[in-house]
Image: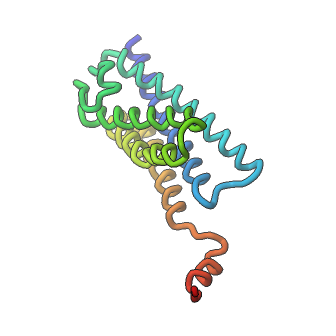
Amino acid sequence: MNEALWFLSRATGIASIALLTAVVVLGVVTSGRRRPHGESATVVMAVHRWLSLGMLSFLTVHVATAVVETYVSIDWVSVLVPFTSGYETFWVGLGTLAVDLLVAVSVTSWLRHRISERAWRAVHYATYALWPMALVHGFVLGTASQAGLRAVTAACGVVGVGAVLWRLLSTHADRTRRDAVLGGEWS
């Protein structure tokens, strides 16, 4: 039974990082001035939300099985309080920090209609910190003998960094016109 929990924890961990990466990429693509409009925006945001819920489900199973299985020593306190685990304190602590930030992002998303856009956006920017933390947590604690698990985590890193770079480096279709207006004389 314990071996099954161990495998379930690893499987749900890898599913969680893959789904988290997809959610982050969709968030990056739909944020800012290049977001889709009309029906496509509705579809993309719905996919973003549903993948988020799926990721939270897999993450819940990942955390629960990591605590319940007895191969390593992780207790329930370590799920919420970073750097308190008896096993790989720093690396498990990174995962805990990511979970804590994810809880804040999730709660503010559920309360989005009750809080200001500025507050929601400020908390949502935490994904730029939680995603790399979760990625490093998964890569370091991933089973060394399972090269496939590390390859999936590394691929998630490449995809996520690519999306962030695209967001930072992409220009607007009307960039020439914007530059001309900015360079004009203002009286």
Q: Return the x and y of residue 165 as percentages of the image width and height.
A: 49, 61
Q: Return the x and y of residue 96 as percentages of the image width and height.
A: 34, 32
Q: Nearer the viewer, residue 81 or 71?
A: 81
**Does the image show residue 144?**
no
Q: Is residue 88 above or below residue 179?
A: above
Q: Residue at x 51, y 43 (%)?
A: 120
Residue 114 position by quadrant: top right
- The furthest residue to the top: 1
Q: Residue at x 30, y 28 (%)?
A: 81
Q: Nearer the viewer, residue 50 or 142?
A: 50
Residue 131 position by quadrant: top left
Does 130 sit left or right of 26 as displayed? Answer: left
Q: Return the x and y of residue 95 as percentages of the image width and height.
A: 35, 34
Q: Quadrant of the C terminus?
A: bottom right
Q: Quadrant of the N terminus?
A: top left
Count of all numbered marks drawn on residues in the image:
0
- The furthest residue to the right: 39
Color style of the picture:
rainbow
Q: Nearer the viewer, residue 3 or 156?
A: 156
Q: Return the x and y of residue 159 as percentages of the image width and height.
A: 51, 52
Q: Residue at x 61, y 77 (%)?
A: 178
**Does the image show residue 103?**
yes
Q: Is residue 180 above or below residue 15?
A: below
- The furthest residue to the front: 187
